[in-house]
Amino acid sequence: MPLKKGINAWCFPAGTEVERIFHLAKEYGYDGVELNLSEDGQSPIHMESTEESLLKVVDLAKEYSLELPSISTALHWKYALTDNDQSLREKGKEVVGKMVEAASIIGAKHVLVVPGLVSDVVSYDVAYERSLAAFKELAEVAEEKKVHIGVENVWNKFLLSPLEMRNFIDEVASGWVGVYFDVGNVLQFGFPEQWIKILGKRICAVHVKDFSRAVGNINGFVPLLAGDVAWEEVIQALEEIGYDGYITPELSPYQYNPEQLIRHTSHSLDTILKLEKHTV
């Protein structure tokens, strides 16, 4: 089954109306849009969203024949599941609960969750224990709503190898908690095709971006096909593990004429997806 083309709403300038997002996504050939949960009304999905408001988003997406496959959020950088402040950890779990609830209403199969942060005040071992406990609890919420939680590999100084990520997911021990794998986030310290093969069926969703190792810092993220991701190897690895879901770019809008990013990214995804036919 061919991979599907997604686009994250963050690829559009902040404040872009959801209907404009859907219009451009459809115009440039995407199959679905990943929406993002905000704390207030800055996005169509937020902490105070009602079922009625979410169903309006669903109806609008249907008008454009688009799927809403997943929900992401940036709130777990603010409300980390590993924070020393228990009230912030609880807020982080509340955010996941809202994401799962919203996903069940709009028909999304996956929500993306940052597993926690290691810092000078939160040690690695403590972060691991807190995060693991949180996901074991949240797995029950996910199972109840039949929505998969995807743990993302991000630049958080935590779960830094595919072996550790694999073991973490296995320790959670729930079919409702897997990996939301970000291809570009690995380039600084590894090889995405290796992560994919090691994580295997634990991968439930995929983000794509590209990265230039020569830059080597946060400024190294570049448009698709402009960096060092070995896309043919990545596509082959995804085929080997039987992944057949969305690949969803999560990129920052261009400073000038931001609509160009949506068009360029669609064309780049077409190039990447054609590699499916040439791998064995």
Image (spheres, rainbow, N blue to C red):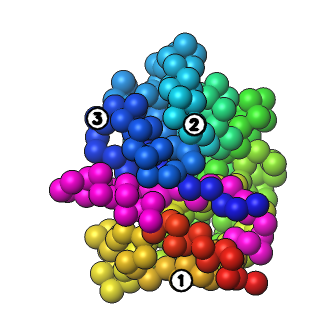
Residue 14 visible within the image: yes
Specify the quadrant of the image occupied by residue 247.
bottom right
The image shows a total of numbered marks equal to 3
Marks 2 and 1, the one that precedes in the sequence = 2
Residue 77 visible within the image: no
- Identify the residue at image location x=56%, y=26%: 58
- Identify the residue at image location x=33%, y=86%: 214
Marks 2 and 3, the one that precedes in the sequence = 3
Q: Looking at the image, which residue sits at the far left?
A: 256
Specify the quadrant of the image occupied by residue 166.
bottom right
Image: 149 above or below 234? above
Q: Which residue is mark 2?
A: 65
Q: CA distance from mark 3 to mark 1?
A: 34 Å
Q: CA distance from mark 2 to mark 1?
A: 32 Å
Q: Is residue 14 left or right of residue 210?
A: left
Image: 208 above or below 188? above
Q: Position of residue 74 (x, y in %)?
A: 42, 44
Q: Label 2's element?
A: loop
Q: Which amino acid type is shown beneath numbered disc 1?
A: Ala
Q: Is residue 118 left or right of residue 70?
A: left
Image: 43 above or below 248? above
Please name which of the two marks, 2 or 3, marks the residue nearer to the observer. 2
Q: Which amino acid type is shown beneath numbered disc 2?
A: Ser
Q: CA distance from mark 2 to mark 3?
A: 22 Å
Q: Which residue is mark 3?
A: 15
Indicate which disc residue 230 carries: 1
Name the quarter where the N terminus is drawn. bottom right
> Which contiguous range is marked in magenta?
238-267
Q: Label 1's element?
A: loop
- Identify the residue at image location x=55%, y=23%: 59
- Please tell me whether residue 241 belongs to the stretch shown in magenta: yes
* Frontmost residue, 110 versus 75: 110
